[in-house]
Each structure stands twice: as C-alpha cells, then as structure tokens.
Image (cartoon, rainbow, N blue to C red):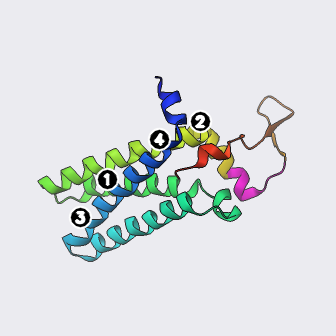
Amino acid sequence: MTLQTLLRNPATGTVLTLGIVALAATTAYVHLTLGGLLFLLNGLGYAGLIVLVVVGAIARHPLVTRFDWFPRIALIGFTAMTIAGYLVIGPYFALGWITKGVELALIVLVVLDVIRVYGSPWSMARLAITSVVGHHDLRQPSPLGGESPVRPPSVPTSAREGL
C-alpha cells in the first residue's frame, strides 16, 4: 500500500484529525500549566486552534468549507513560531524539549493532512488565495508575457472528510 493510497482512505482523515487534536491538546495543557502570561497565551492559542480544527471536521457549512484551509495554515504557523520562540528564549529543560518533539509531530501530522486533502501544499495555497479573492478565473501576468490562469484545484468533497 502506497502513501497516496493510504492517505485517500476515509478512515485516515479521522485518525489524522484525532492525532492533531491530541497533540495540540497535549502542548496546550503543558503551556497552560507552566504559569506566566506568555505560556498562558500560548496555551489559549492552541485551545482556540483545536476548536477551529474540530469545527472544520464537523461542520458542513459553506463558509466553513470555503475556509477549511485556515486552521491548517494557522496551526503550522503557530506551532513553528512556538518552537522558534523556545529556541530563542528558553528556558531549556526536559519538559520543554519533549514538548518541542510533540509540536514537531503535530506539524508532520498537519502536513500529511494537507497532502491528503489537497494533494500538495501548493494546491492548498492556490485554493486559499481563490477562497479569499473569489471563485472566478483569475488572470495574472506571466513573467514570460501574456496571462496565466490561476484556478482553484478540484478537491473532491470526500477528501475533505476528517478535517
């Protein structure tokens, strides 16, 4: 069984979503229990992103479906900035390094989910741009002259199950 076949399995979406929620909840719990304003805000940020992930997995409202890429991008960016902040500021201790491992695993699961749903990060980026700008045939000047169409990728609704 190839990775692409495994990622197309509907059960994979559910497992990935549960893994994303579990890892995000783990790092949120750690940050909420450390004390201090910065850790509190970080933990609340993870809690808010967990809500977005769960709403994206459950709700089938057109607005939620249109912006279902947002929790993925936000979670990757927030987690990457948390890791960068730890590496710059510290404090360096065992629980901190364990939490960074959890956060790296979280990024990996979200990237796998992006590949599962959109086929590639670039396809998700194109869909994100068109969902913000609008769903019409966008024309952009090509560096070689003329115009190049930017169209939203076709993502089957069955691939969106799970997140």
Residue lying at 79% horizontally and 53% vertically, measured from the top left: 135
Residue lying at 74% horizontally and 44% vertically, measured from the top left: 152
The answer to which of 38 and 107 lies nearer the viewer is: 107
As measured in the structure, the alpha-carbon distance from the residue carrying label 2 to the one carrying label 3 is 33 Å
The answer to which of 100 and 105 lies nearer the viewer is: 105
Residue lying furthest left: 94
Q: Nearer the viewer, mark 4 or mark 2?
A: 4
Q: Which residue is mark 1?
A: 83
How many discs mark residues in the rendered view?
A: 4
Amino acid type at image mark 2: Gly
Stretch in magenta: 129-136
Q: Which residue is mark 4?
A: 12
As measured in the structure, the alpha-carbon distance from the residue carrying label 1 to the one carrying label 2 is 26 Å
Q: Is residue 58 above or below residue 137?
A: below
Q: Nearer the viewer, mark 4 or mark 1?
A: 4
- Nearest to N terminus: mark 3 or mark 1: 3
Residue 30 — which label? Answer: 3
Does the stretch in magenta take in 134? Answer: yes
Could you classify mark 2 by the number of other residues whose Cα lies within 10 Å: few (under 14), some (14-19), or many (20 or more)? some
Q: Is residue 98 above or below residue 123?
A: below
